[in-house]
């Protein structure tokens, strides 16, 4: 379980997320729950990755 206070994605490029996830040990799937509105760059960067889900908090 990793908790980030403020997760900012530098660009909408998928390769940034792929590089970030590859640095995590034993990560097969990733669930990101955003505390506010989902950042458009994060949404675009993860939309083609089947092992990453981005959800808003309720």
Image (tube, grey):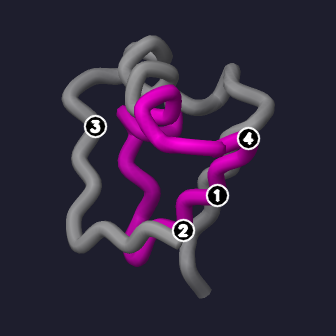
Find numbered disc 1 in the image and state the secondary structure of the residue it sits on.
strand
Question: Which of the two discs, 3 and 2, labels the residue nearer the N terminus?
Answer: 3
Find numbered disc 2 in the image and state the secondary structure of the residue it sits on.
strand
Find numbered disc 3 in the image and state the secondary structure of the residue it sits on.
loop
Which label was assigned to residue 22? none
Q: Nearer the viewer, mark 3 or mark 1?
A: 1
In this view, 35 is above or below 49: below
Question: Badge 4: how crowded within 10 Å, few (<14), some, or many (20+)?
Answer: few
Which residue sits furthest right? 50
Question: Which of the two discs, 4 and 3, labels the residue nearer the N terminus?
Answer: 3
Q: Is residue 6 magenta?
A: no
Question: Badge 2: how crowded within 10 Å, few (<14), some, or many (20+)?
Answer: some
Instruction: Read off the residue under disc 4.
Output: 28
Instruction: Read off the residue under disc 1.
Output: 31
Using the numbered discs, state the Cα–Cα distance from disc 1 to disc 2 in whole angstroms: 6 Å
Q: Is residue 36 left or right of residue 51?
A: left
Taking the spot 54% from the left edge, 68% from the top edge, the residue there is: 33
Instruction: Read off the residue under disc 2.
Output: 33
Q: Is residue 26 left or right of residue 40?
A: right
Depth order, front residue of 19/34 = 19
**Residue 42 coordinates in the image, percent (x, y):** 42, 39
User: Is disc 1 in contact with disc 2, using a CB cutoff of under 8 Å?
Assistant: yes
| Count of numbered circles on the image | 4
Using the numbered discs, state the Cα–Cα distance from disc 4 to disc 2 in whole angstroms: 17 Å
Q: Is residue 29 left or right of residue 58?
A: right
- The image quarter containing residue 55 is bottom right
The region drawn magenta spans: 21-43
User: Is disc 4 in contact with disc 3, using a CB cutoff of under 8 Å?
Assistant: no
Which residue sits furthest front? 25
**Residue 3 coordinates in the image, percent (x, y):** 38, 73
Q: Nearer the viewer, mark 1 or mark 4?
A: 4
Instruction: Read off the residue under disc 3.
Output: 9
């Amino acid at each position: 379980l990793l908790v980030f206070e403020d997760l900012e994605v530098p660009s909408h490029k998928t390769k940034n997320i792929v590089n970030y996830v590859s640095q995590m040990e034993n990560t097969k799937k990733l669930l990101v729950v955003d505390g506010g509105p989902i950042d458009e760059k994060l949404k675009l960067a993860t939309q083609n990755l089947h092992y990453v889900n981005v959800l808003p908090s309720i």
